[in-house]
Image (tube, rainbow, N blue to C red):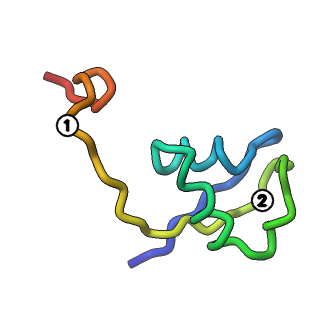
Amino acid sequence: MKNKTYSTIQGDMWDGIAMKVFGNESYMDKLIEANPSQQTRVIFPANIVLNIPVIAVPTSSNLPPWKRGDND
């Protein structure tokens, strides 16, 4: 399995990156743990490559279709 990465854009922050890659900013701690060399950053410059850990992201069927991404 190939490791997933994310290349930052100017102004990215941990919570925003977690929202982009996992759909929930509460997983930012997993991102920080997976990137120990970047742990002290708060706001990223462009082109920092971060490792994206594989985590189990639960899905909720209580969300309305437009929030779930259903196309029906």
Q: Position of residue 23 (x, y in %)?
A: 46, 43
Q: Residue 53, percent across and down?
A: 51, 69
Q: Tell me whether the residue at label 2 lies in contact with that at label 1, contact meaning CB atoms closer than 8 angstroms.
A: no
Q: Quadrant of the C terminus?
A: top left
72 with respect to 22 (left or right): left
Q: Earlier in the sequence, mark 2 or mark 1?
A: 2
- List x then y, in percent, for residue 55: 42, 66
Identify the residue at image location x=65%, y=45%: 15
Label 2 sits on a secondary structure element that is loop
Label 2 CA crowd tier, 10 Å (few <14, some 14–19, many 20+): some
Q: Quadrant of residue 54?
A: bottom left
The residue at 85%/58% (across/down) is 41
Image quarter (top left, top right, bottom left or bottom right) of the N terminus: bottom left
Dot 2 amino acid type:
Ile
* Most foreground residue, 25 or 69: 25
Residue 48 image label: 2
Say left or right for 63 vs 34: left
Question: What's the residue type where badge 1 is placed?
Answer: Ser
> What residue did someone put label 1 on?
61
Name the residue: 33% across, 26% down.
67
Cα distance between the residues tagged 2 and 1 = 35 Å
Looking at the rendered structure, the secondary structure element under dot 1 is loop
Quarter of the image where one finds residue 57: bottom left
Q: Nearer the viewer, residue 49 or 62?
A: 62
Q: Position of residue 71 (x, y in %)?
A: 20, 25
